Amino acid sequence: MEPQTIPLTQLSPGAHALVLDMQENPQVCYLKCLGFCPGAHVELVRRVSRGALSIYRVDDADVALRKETAALISVVLER
């Protein structure tokens, strides 16, 4: 059974996932510099600002992303 691909915005707090891909967008280079590269481990730490902003942990660094930006990233849940 193939793992389900979801947008990063659908992670639950404390959930761990692997980055699979990103939609083509001018922000892709910026996201890669932050560590959101295919194969990177990411965890949703918490949501703030009524869900408009989320804190993700990627490569031992905490990064805040807007919901619109996080939606560009496709992940698969780690088991």
Image: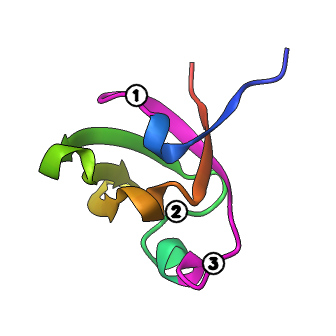
Q: Are marks 3 and 2 in contact (CB under 8 Å)?
A: no
The residues bearing labels 1 and 2 have C-alpha atoms spaced at a distance of: 16 Å
Tell me which amino acid carries mark 3: Asn
Q: Is residue 23 above or below residue 16?
A: below
Q: Is residue 29 left or right of residue 1?
A: left
Circle 1 sits on which residue?
15
Q: Which residues are magenta?
A: 11-29
Q: Which mark is residue 36?
A: 2
Circle 3 sits on which residue?
25
The residues bearing labels 3 and 1 have C-alpha atoms spaced at a distance of: 25 Å
Q: Residue 61, position in %: x, y?
A: 29, 59
**Who's the residue at 14% across and 52% down the image?**
49
**Who's the residue at 26% across and 53% down the image?**
52
Tell me which amino acid carries mark 2: Phe
- Res 37 → quadrant: bottom right
Q: Residue 59, position in %: x, y?
A: 40, 56
